[in-house]
Image: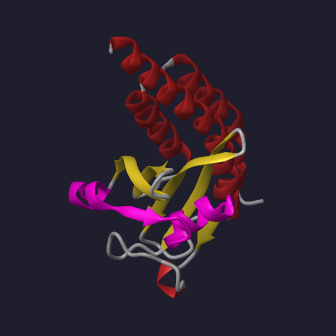
């Protein structure tokens, strides 16, 4: 294990506790997603961070929150289940780690010069609700250790996202 891997491993437990605290103490989805993006950046220095949520009727993912995408890209980006790295993660319900996206036939280029991408499905009660996606320009930037860590974060985030969405829906219904 390298020094950087040891450093990452020592930060995992406190980070997961912070993530759990964030998702359990706020029902505001925007606040939750922003705070989790900040926490992830403490241990994985990504260039792009995005939470894509699943539109179940259309069976496509849309960007709900992002750091690093140009606004026009985030606003128009729609990914069908099975397409691209994020669509594949959602469809297979498995993490997808790509060292050089330009070498993958299934890669969809949303932003030029991205090479590394890591997408983790967000699953609640055996149902995919979205994907957490991080990207970097450097080839081979993300590691198996990053994949394990982001998978742990995603499992905690998924419940928080679903709770916030239910809270928003319930609040909206109560007003009508």
Which residue is rendered at x = 46% and y = 30% of the image? 32
Q: How many marks?
A: 0
Which residue is rendered at x = 52% and y = 43% of the image? 40
Please indicate, yes or no, whether residue 7 appears anywhere in the rendered image: no
Asked whether 26 or 60 is in front, the reply is 60
Q: In the rendered view, tell whether residue 37 sits above or below residue 105.
A: above
- Quadrant holding the C terminus: top left
Residue 89 highlighted magenta (yes or no): yes
Image location of residue 12, percent across then percent down: 68, 40
Indicate left or right for 135 with 162 as reference: left
The stretch of residues the image draws in magenta is 69-95
Residue with the most extreme front position:
176
Rendering quarter of residue 109: bottom left
Please indicate, yes or no, whether residue 50 appears anywhere in the rendered image: yes
- Quadrant holding the N terminus: bottom right
Which residue is rendered at x = 64% and y = 35% of the image? 156
Image location of residue 22, percent across then percent down: 54, 25
Rendering quarter of residue 175: top left
């Amino acid at each position: 294990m390298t020094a950087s891997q040891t450093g990452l491993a020592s930060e995992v437990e406190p980070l997961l506790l912070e993530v759990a605290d964030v998702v359990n103490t706020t029902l505001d989805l925007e606040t939750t997603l922003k705070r989790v993006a900040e926490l992830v950046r403490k241990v994985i220095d990504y260039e792009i961070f995005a939470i894509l949520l699943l539109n179940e009727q259309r069976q496509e993912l849309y960007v709900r929150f992002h750091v690093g995408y140009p606004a026009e890209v985030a606003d128009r980006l729609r990914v069908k289940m099975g397409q691209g790295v994020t669509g594949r993660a959602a469809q297979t319900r498995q993490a997808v780690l790509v060292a050089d996206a330009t070498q993958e036939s299934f890669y969809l280029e949303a932003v030029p010069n991205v090479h590394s991408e890591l997408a983790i499905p967000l699953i609640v009660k055996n149902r995919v609700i979205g994907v957490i996606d991080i990207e970097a320009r450097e080839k081979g930037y993300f590691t198996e250790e990053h994949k394990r860590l982001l998978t742990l974060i995603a499992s905690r985030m998924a419940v928080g996202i679903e709770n916030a969405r239910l809270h928003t829906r319930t609040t909206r219904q109560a007003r009508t």
